[in-house]
Amino acid sequence: MNQPTPGKLRQSPAWKALQAHQAEIAQVHMRELFARSPERAQEFSLEAGALLLDYSKHRVIGTTLALLIDLARQAGVEAWRARMFAGEHINASEDRAVLHVALRSALEAFPAGNDVMPLVRKARQGMRAFSDAVRGGRLLGHSGKPMRTVINIGIGGSDLGPRMLVQALWRHADAAQAVHFVANADPDDLARVLSQAQPESTLFIVASKTFTTGETLANARLARAWLIDGLHSEAAVSKHFAAATANVKAAAEFGIAPELCFSLWDWVGGRYSVWSTVGLPVAIAIGMDRFEELLAGARAMDEHFLRAPLEANMPVLLALLGIWYANFFGAESHAVLPYAEALRELPAYLQQLEMESNGKSVDRDGQPVDYATVPVVWGAVGTNSQHAFHQMLHQGTHLVPCDFLVPVATTGAAAENALAQAAALMAGKDASLAQRRFDGNRPSSTILFKTIDPNTMGQLLALYEHKVFVQGIIWNINSFDQWGVELGKEIARTLAQSAAAAAEAGMDASTNALMRRLRAWRG
Ligand code: F6P
């Protein structure tokens, strides 16, 4: 691959051209751009499947986009995309392929030479049989009662995706089937959920690719104790626990019956795993037919990403616009604003997707990068967010590009509010009193879609996955490892042992003092 080495990206022709161009564009107000071109809204919008992306409220002109596309070409985005879809080990630091796209593929065999589709099909069949049995009341617990409460125990990618989708797709779910999520190391999380559950009708799904994650195992053990205590039987565990994992051995040791252990593989990253058996809670909530619609939606976006020219490729455009602000305007954060109560959990999901993937400061060769990578991704559901932090978006000192995600069918006045916010951020408003003045010229994308249904959600999530991929390629980083989460885990394990172990591990004076206080206060 002809990748720029450190220092080289910023010295590269495409980067330098963008820098020079930025100096011109920085002087221009978007109001002027709209005044200049009556066609601007059409020119800078794109439809793909169910999604309409309006990117006209960005500080770009045709030249900007052409230069950004040059940057993508210079980075070899097309070649890297082909390598991912060919199943090459592009996750080099873990020596793994990146094949979440296989999880939604409809191909008979994929990828060529390393066909994983038989595994994928088998897992889908298992999910169908299992979710049908749960929904149909045919999966019986230890005392012969159907499982009416499902509790997913997992964290990070084994929690955020299914949690977000169960919330998003509640209109498509079976109301008789309660599906809860527990993630936190704080046992309060589990306790709250268990306080509403009956052991004889509760099914736990332990979702953990590695089956070694501290929080998940601790919660799973607490849940197992609660179950055994409630049903007075250890044998109940094999009926009330299922798992989604790549570590079948550890799941079996925990007591999970082989027929309730659903496979996962090392070529699926945690934050890309909602399409796999990690999606079981979603399949139970909405049924496997609808889950397949979710996969079909993602597949449609995969096709678009693979086939559309870069200039008309939605994930590529979103990626490039993000790079434009992060690297050429110094924007340090990016707001995600879904205008739908059902999408309340989406910002948290996208936080992991974007920041765990691209929160890196060394390149693929381990050399420090000398440019910004992923900005802080944050956000909240609109219209609530308007009454919390939009003041800063409109009049604060930071430039915060925003994504407005606007489903229109069931969201009432929320949709109009989203459009109003985007318009106000762009145009601003003059006033004689400085405090009442809005400078405007604040960029946003608007993604409009009709409804929040499984297919559309599949498209939307795959859109962001591919956006993250393209940015990672341009920044020349590995988007698919996450070594940065390891050190804290390691230290937490030491601290959990004893104060002596912490002291022995040579912890700093501050942590040691806090540990002493923590233990004293706990008595
Ligand atoms: O802590 C980071 C992480 O490894 C995530 O990438 C992952 O989604 C999460 O932990 C959970 O991991 P597992 O599914 O192995 O329990």
Image (tube, helix red, strand yellow):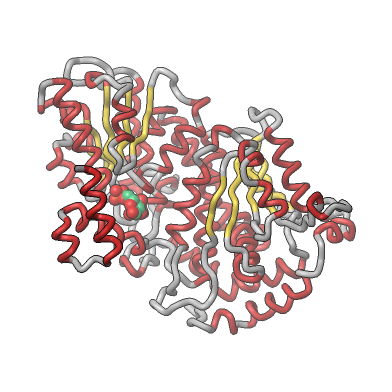
240 left or right of 118 in image: left
The answer to which quarter of the image holds residue 305 is bottom right
Q: Which residue is located at x 37 percent, y 30 percent?
A: 180
Q: Is residue 115 among what the camera can see?
A: no
Q: Which residue is located at x 10 percent, y 28 percent?
A: 234
Toward the viewer: 216 or 113?
216
Count the numbered circles shown.
0
Looking at the image, the residue that sits furthest to the top is 144
The answer to which quarter of the image holds residue 418 is top right
Against 103, residue 285 (above or below) is above
Against 22, residue 384 (above or below) is above
Q: Position of residue 107 (x, y in %)?
A: 43, 48
Q: Position of residue 341 (x, y in %)?
A: 57, 33
Q: Which residue is located at x 57 percent, y 39 percent?
A: 456
The answer to which quarter of the image holds residue 98 is bottom left
239 left or right of 335 in image: left
Q: Position of residue 278 (x, y in %)?
A: 35, 41
Toward the viewer: 363 or 503?
503
Against 486, residue 456 (above or below) is above
Q: Quadrant of the C terminus?
A: top left
170 left or right of 318 in image: left
Q: Position of residue 78 (x, y in %)?
A: 54, 67
Q: Is residue 337 among what the camera can see?
A: yes
